Amino acid sequence: MNAQQMHEELLQRVHQGELCEEDVPEVSTIQNWISGFSRRWKEAMALRSVLCFL
């Protein structure tokens, strides 16, 4: 799921009454979250890989 798809899913939840529209972040914010998570995940997996070979 990409940032645009996630944003659309959140907007659907707004229309269903599950969320307030003010609580839905912009697509760029969601993309930044995804990028940050991906970067940290890759760093963690690289560290794990190195530690497994020690």
Image (cartoon, rainbow, N blue to C red):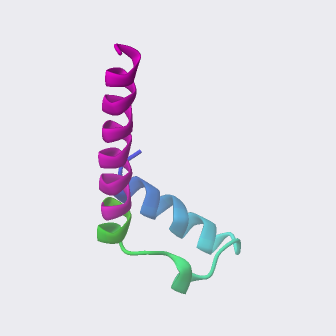
Report the front residue among 45 and 2: 45
Could you tell whether 17 is left or right of 51 in the image?
A: right
Query: Based on the displayed image, in which of its 4 quarters is residue 29 positioned?
Result: bottom left
User: Magenta segment, which residues?
Assistant: 32-54
Q: Is residue 20 above or below residue 34?
A: below
Residue 5 percent coordinates (x, y): 41, 54
Q: Could you tell me what secondary structure mostly forms the magenta stretch?
A: helix
Report the front residue among 33 and 14: 33
Residue 47 percent coordinates (x, y): 34, 32
Q: Quadrant of the N terminus?
A: top left
Q: Is residue 40 magenta?
A: yes
Query: Based on the displayed image, in which of its 4 quarters is residue 7 positioned?
Result: bottom left
Residue 14 percent coordinates (x, y): 60, 74
Residue 41 percent coordinates (x, y): 38, 41
Query: Based on the displayed image, in which of its 4 quarters is residue 31 positioned?
Result: bottom left
User: Which residue is at 38% across, 64% downward?
Assistant: 30
